[in-house]
Amino acid sequence: MKKAIKIIGVILFVVVLIAAGVAIWQWDTISIIFGNKNISGPVGAVPEPAIQQELPLTKGEADWICWRGSRGDGRSGVTGISTDWSGGLQKKWQVDFLCRGRVSATWSAPVVQGNRLVVCGRDETGDLVFCLSPEDGSLIWKSSYPAEAKSNYGTGSRATPWIDDDRVYTFGRSGDLVCWNLLNGSKLWHKNVNDEGGEAPTWGHSTSPLVTDTLVIVNGGGTARTIAYDKKTGAVEWKSGGGQAGYAAISRMQIEDVPALLIFHGKGLAALVLADGKEMWNVPWETNYDVHATTPLVSGDRVFITSGYGTGGELLKVDKSKAEVVWKSEVIASHHSDLFIINGFIYGYSGDSMQNKGVFKCVELDTGVEKWSTKEMGWGTCVYVDGFLLCSDIKGNIFLMKPDPEKFVKVTGMSRSLGKVRGAAWTVPVLANGNLFLRFKQSLLCYGISQKPTRVGGLLLLNN
């Protein structure tokens, strides 16, 4: 009996030792899994509005009104940026009140038009929408609506709003599509995709709304994979397709003479006619957990898609009736970090977002041949600005690199721009009107980054 007990004890010791070794080896991933489920760090009180709500709306020289910017290509109009961050960038302001409640993490990025910044948040019972001054972070208005949501990596919005002149559209993880008055935050209309047959994917509705001259379009899933609403009234104009919604934003593309939409859904990529939602073609693309979260890239008549979990990427040549594979490879497998096509080369992160040991790569678009890769920038997200790529890893370290197909060119960098990060900062950086905006859950920070004066609504703002 004693011998058996000793043997059992030795086995348990070995098991614990192995488990401890695995935990140490995978600590980065484990800390992100648990760190991103809940809010940590200080949560500030929501202030009273400090600016008169009727302050006239303005527009700026380099607004950022929606996911990947108004052109949908991730390129900011900001120019004259500082390329020496050795002394750090000037932090202009910080707010810490966007998420309220232990499980209220929100990943939605801010959008900026002139003297208005809109960013989503969450409290214990509903979705929040804040409008701030982009220059000093003061609160202009706050609106909300009740919404039940699962707490898987936070109950807050994943989708980024879209500002359309004097309106702004938000899309919550529970399927609420809401149109707000940008001037004062009053609700103009409110719909839920589930009422049209929609069904949330595992990690919640995530499509950033796409706004056209007459429509606002989101992915609903279920029996309404894609839904187009009249942007003025909220009336349903058309529904298209069925099956699981993807997590990627909807892209626009001109396919021959037809304005079209690219829908990266749970099982593949579909092209729809913008006017009526008619499906032009639908090609399969399978990924673990059906996570397609990276925005498709468009270059002429070609489309590049990529997904994580080692799936890789595929370049397609498309017309109105079909999409043909040009090449398929595991050279880039991007989980949910959007890529860029610059002068015939793909630049971006490869790897999964549960660790900070990803690889940044340059790949030739025509062939899929890797030109170079680097591990110097962790894993993160990027925005193109003033001829550079500004990248932020999941710990809030930011980098500025020069796209070059021959070699990796790091220009400058700055550590801990978000302070202490428990978990992973997944929200993409936003650059608008001379400012850099960085978000992590309840916190939004603004840094001055441009050395060039910026004109907003007739006012000249000095970025220093």
Image (cartoon, rainbow, N blue to C red):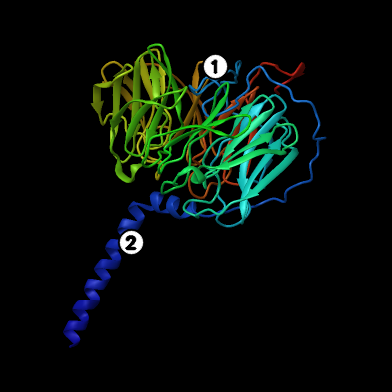
Q: State which quarter of the image contains the C terminus.
A: top right
Q: State which quarter of the image contains the N terminus.
A: bottom left
Lateral position of residue 238 relative to residue 214, left or right: left
Residue 285 at what x, y percent from top left?
A: 29, 34
Residue 157 at what x, y percent from top left?
A: 55, 44
Q: Amino acid at mark 2?
A: Ala
| Residue of label 1 | 386
Lateral position of residue 317 relative to residue 339, left or right: left
Q: Name the foreground residue: 388 vs 295.
A: 295
Q: Name the foreground residue: 153 vs 320.
A: 320
Question: At x 72% / y 27%, what residue is drawn?
Answer: 115
Give the SS element for disc 2.
Answer: helix
| Residue of label 2 | 20
Farthest residue to the bottom: give it: 1
Compared to residue 195, the image places residue 438 above or below, namely above
Q: Name the foreground residue: 266 vs 450.
A: 266
Residue 88 in view, yes or no: no
Density class for disc 1 (Cα within 10 Å; few <14, some 14-19, many ≥20) is some
Q: Amino acid at mark 1?
A: Asp
Residue 4 at what x, y percent from top left?
A: 17, 82
The tag on residue 237 is none
Residue 24 in view, yes or no: yes
